[in-house]
Image (cartoon, grey):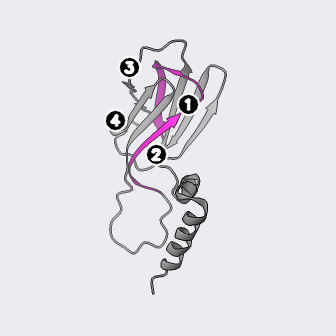
């Protein structure tokens, strides 16, 4: 007997009762977004901490700032092979994440640094936009 069959049947019943979009509200709970971020808002600045363990080359992580959207792309790779998995809580793999920002930010004034598995982005409030999408350079503090 498939242990997940009852769960699938339960999900189908919930879809029928609440509608197809019912589960979309729980996406972040059932399948946490990768990578995890903390975003803090100030009057003229946003500070974003991005959890990126296992990134060997920070230059292979893409950070794009486009008006009021932050886009992150890259790969988290723990690079472990063999052995039986007992517990695996660190999410890994290729990621692509878009985050809507509370206000527009400048693409030309983004401070980005990476150290100890955390990418720190300082985004400065925008007064006007040029409509272009720009890649942000990240300073790897572990190399200095």
Q: CA distance from mark 2 to mark 4?
A: 13 Å
Is 104 contained in the magenta span? yes
Report the mark closest to the observer, 3 or 4.
3
* Secondary structure at numbered mark 3: loop
The boundaries of the magenta stretch are: 91-117
* Secondary structure at numbered mark 4: helix
Q: Which residue is mark 1?
A: 101
Residue occupying the point 33% across, 66% down: 81
Residue sitting nearer the eye, 111 or 46 = 46
The earlier-in-sequence mark between 1 and 4 is 4
49 displayed left or right of 43:
left
Residue 92: x and y in percent read 41, 55
Residue sitting nearer the eye, 49 or 56 = 49
- Label disc, if present, on residue 52 of the rendered structure: 2
Look at the numbered discs 3 and 4 and tell me whether their residues touch, using CB distance below 8 Å. Answer: no
Badge 3 density bin: few <14, some 14–19, many ≥20, Cα 10 Å: few
17 displayed left or right of 111:
right
Residue 76: x and y in percent read 39, 50
Q: CA distance from mark 1 to mark 2?
A: 20 Å
Quarter of the N terminus within the rendering? bottom left
33 shown above or below 64: below
Q: Which residue is mark 4?
A: 59
* Secondary structure at numbered mark 2: loop
Q: CA distance from mark 1 to mark 3?
A: 16 Å
- Label disc, if present, on residue 132 of the rendered structure: 3
Residue 144 visible within the image: no
Residue occupying the point 38% across, 19% down: 132
């Amino acid at each position: 007997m498939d242990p997940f069959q009852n769960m699938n049947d339960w999900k189908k019943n919930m879809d029928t009762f609440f509608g197809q979009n019912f589960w979309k509200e729980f996406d972040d709970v059932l399948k946490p977004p990768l990578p995890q971020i903390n975003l803090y808002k100030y009057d003229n600045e946003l500070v974003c901490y991005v959890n990126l363990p296992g990134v060997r080359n920070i230059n292979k992580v893409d950070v794009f700032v486009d008006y009021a959207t932050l886009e992150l792309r890259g790969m988290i790779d723990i690079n472990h092979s063999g052995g039986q998995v007992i517990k695996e809580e660190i999410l890994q793999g290729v990621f692509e994440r878009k985050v809507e920002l509370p206000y527009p930010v400048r693409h030309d004034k983004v401070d980005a640094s990476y150290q100890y598995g955390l990418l720190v982005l300082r985004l400065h409030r925008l007064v006007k936009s040029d409509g272009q999408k720009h890649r942000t350079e990240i300073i790897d503090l572990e190399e200095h």
